[in-house]
Amino acid sequence: MWAIKVKSFVILISLLWGSFGISAYAQSWPQKPIKFIVPFSAGGANDLMARAAAEGASKVLGQTIVVENKPGAGGSIGTVFVSKSAPDGYTFLISAAGVISNNMIKKTTNYKDSDLVPVVMIGLAPSVIVVSSESNYKNLRNFVDASKEGAGLHFATAGTGSTPHFVAELLNTRYGAKLIPVPYKSGSEGASAVMGGQVAGTSEASIVALPHIKPGGKFRALATTWTKRISVYPELSTAVEQGFPDLQIAHWAGIHAPVGVPPDIMDKLAAAVDVAMKSPQVSDRLKSQGIEPVGGTRASFNEFVDAERARLGAIVKAANMKDEQ
């Protein structure tokens, strides 16, 4: 009996010491530079949001945050790298919708959803549905109605599971549109195809689309697909306002951690990013580029990720979206 009591006491002390050690480690974090891994090329919406978050959060934490781009395989290369990283609080993923949808669509990704933990939302670049400035379509209703006639309309995407692909399939499955997805290697190639008249339209991140929508530009904007109008372009109505209440999708960026990072560290990083997104210096700069800063808490980002997983999963199933890769 005495031996059992001693053993139980030793186990209890070990557990308490382990908890104390983790807590002390989290309190002293960060003691060296932190890495934000962007799974896309530099210059895109995801990359710009990552750099804004890194700049603002580093000031709050008093430690350098390095942004490192690891593009390829639709974001999977960078995502796998972070999922296999040590959970010490010094390597994080700048996540996008693909971190949720890739495992729904791709045959193999080399990571499981459970390998990554949501930390905080950074912001989003609302998607904008665009056509050539020389087309006859004036709004989203015109475009969808026209697609229902004849063989349908070709719609450029950045590949299977990209945001434009989800926009097209959501309009097809929920509103009876007849949009034929045409995959390109990148959003910029798809945008060029719209400008050149090879396809009828596409959707693109606000930061990419807005410079081409100004008077004399080569795009005509039909609608933004987020729940609110774009701060820097309020004259463009939302798809919801035009009678498409289910069309709510954006190019968002958040932060995920490899599973095992202490919760206290994730809370500190989430709080730092939230402060950054609410600072006028960062917020005003992002809004001027068509990006909406969000921030928030770990809890609010977890709720967003859960809702996004359910919503995107329903579209994948309804449209039978599959990637041969």
Image (tube, helix red, strand yellow):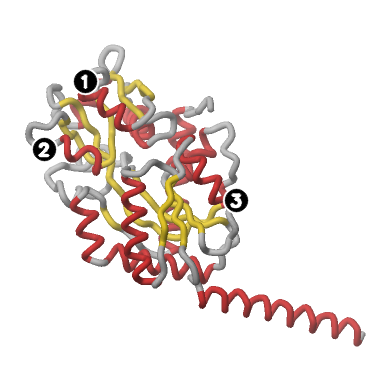
Mark before the other along the chain sequence, 3 or 2: 3
Q: Nearer the viewer, residue 318 or 99?
A: 99
Look at mark 3 in the image and give the residue it sits on. Answer: 84
Question: For residue 206, which quarter of the picture?
Answer: top left
> Is residue 280 positioned above or below 4 on the image?
above
- Type of amino acid at the residue the image marks with label 2: Lys
Q: Is residue 173 among what the camera can see?
A: no
Q: Secondary structure at mark 3?
A: loop
In which quadrant will I find the N terminus?
Answer: bottom right
Name the residue at the top extreme: 150
> Is residue 292 positioned above or below 3 on the image?
above
Look at mark 1 in the image and give the residue it sits on. Answer: 196
Question: For residue 3, which quarter of the picture?
Answer: bottom right
The residue lying at 79 percent from left, 82 percent from top is 10
Name the residue at the left extreme: 215
Q: Verify CB contact (< 8 Å) between mark 2 and mark 1.
A: no
How much space separates mark 2 and mark 1, taking CA atoms? 17 Å
How much space separates mark 1 and mark 3, taking CA atoms? 42 Å
The residue lying at 28 percent from left, 57 percent from top is 293
Q: Is residue 51 left or right of residue 129?
A: right
Q: Position of residue 112 (x, y in %)?
A: 59, 45
How much space separates mark 3 and mark 2, taking CA atoms? 44 Å
Q: Is residue 284 left or right of residue 56?
A: left
- Type of amino acid at the residue the image marks with label 1: Gly
Look at mark 2 in the image and give the residue it sits on. Answer: 214
Q: Secondary structure at mark 1?
A: loop
